[in-house]
Amino acid sequence: MNKVRTWFHSEAFNNKIFPELERLIAVIVFTIIYGIGVSWFLEASVVPLYTGGIPGIGQLVRDAMYVWFNIDVGNNFLGLFVIILNIPVLLIGWFGVSHRFTVYSIISVLLQATILSWFPKVNMGLDSVEHVFAAAVLGGLLIGIGAGGALRYGTSTGGLDILSQWYSFKKGKSVGFISMLMNLAIALVGAFIVGGSVGPSGLVISGGVIASYTVIRIIISTIMTDRLHTSYQFLSVDIITSTPQVLVDEILLKVYRGVTLMKVEGAYSRHEKTLIYVVISSYELHTLVQMVKRVDPNAFVVTRPVKNVFGNFKRKTIA
């Protein structure tokens, strides 16, 4: 028992195994949240509400088959569509983002497909016209939390999130904003396909109504995604410490950021200390703070938002 307790407190567990367990739990939880948002809320609405990414494209294809050719592709179609179309996108993630990011995205895609097609659906009482707004708001909220939370922990819900992540690192743009542009295109196509026709719900809904409610869903999802995922934002961090060399070695080795050192003196204590200055992406802050607490619990840490960074600063993948 003591050996097990010692192992749980070991550096190997805390630095290597625990972060991966945390990421695995996060991707499972946030993918479930995302899938419930789509399956229990958007799909329950009598007015077609489209999610983003590959599941949204799957919804478009399914509705087009029904409206244009009167073909019902069945309940399993969406899950199978998500798995098949994610294959080339995951390859882009493997070579363009990172291997670890893609592995966790694969887990998310498989779980997402299961929820969309084979997970029991719970009736939330949103299957009437007067509840469409509630379905759009609640569905958008859950989808934004799921997508943003997964990205925050170094993975994604797959599909176009991977392309958004890749473009965000290349251009330093908001992932939520990039996803919003893609999702708007899906909303407009969905309005064109189903608008004015008898949809799967048996109702004739105008394209404007479909687009309007889907845009509401997109705006809420975008806000939630950017609230949770902020890796394109930068922070400057000042660390005043009495053990600078140990911290510098940790930062260089584990955060992979350059640092600047300055000698400072406390006005009250008159003790000389070292100020470590480093610029990081905001998603790296948690790792850095935990590192400082472990090495020097008495260190003083100050963070400031940074609008732009020029020079030798690499935008890194998050996994």
Image (cartoon, grey):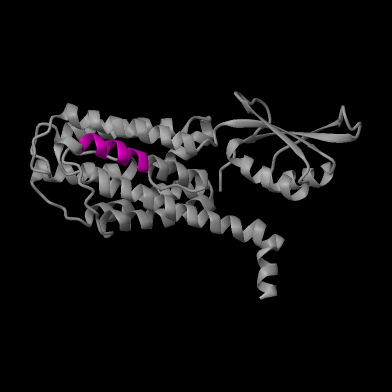
Residue at image coords 24%, 54%:
122
Q: Position of residue 194 (x, y in %)?
A: 15, 36
Q: Is residue 140 above or below residue 77?
A: above
Answer whether residue 315 is visible to the viewer in this image.
no
Residue at image coords 43%, 55%:
28
Q: Is residue 131 left or right of residue 112?
A: left
- 35 magenta-colored: no
Residue sitting farthest toward the front: 268
Residue sitting farthest toward the bottom: 1
Name the dominant secondary structure of the magenta segment: helix
Residue 241 position by quadrant: top right
Image quadrant holding the N terminus, namely bottom right
Answer whether residue 39 is visible to the viewer in this image.
yes
Q: Is residue 306 left or right of residue 190?
A: right
Depth check: give the residue in front, 248 or 313: 248
Q: Is residue 59 left or right of residue 265?
A: left
Q: Position of residue 312 (x, y in %)?
A: 68, 31
Q: Position of residue 260 (x, y in %)?
A: 78, 33
Q: Is residue 96 left or right of residue 243?
A: left
Depth check: give the residue in front, 18 or 256: 18
Depth check: give the residue in front, 13 or 272: 272
User: What is the span of residues highlighted in magenta in the rendered image?
Assistant: 132-142
Tally the numbered discs: 0
Q: Position of residue 219 (x, y in %)?
A: 35, 30
Residue at image coords 20%, 42%:
45
- 138 magenta-colored: yes
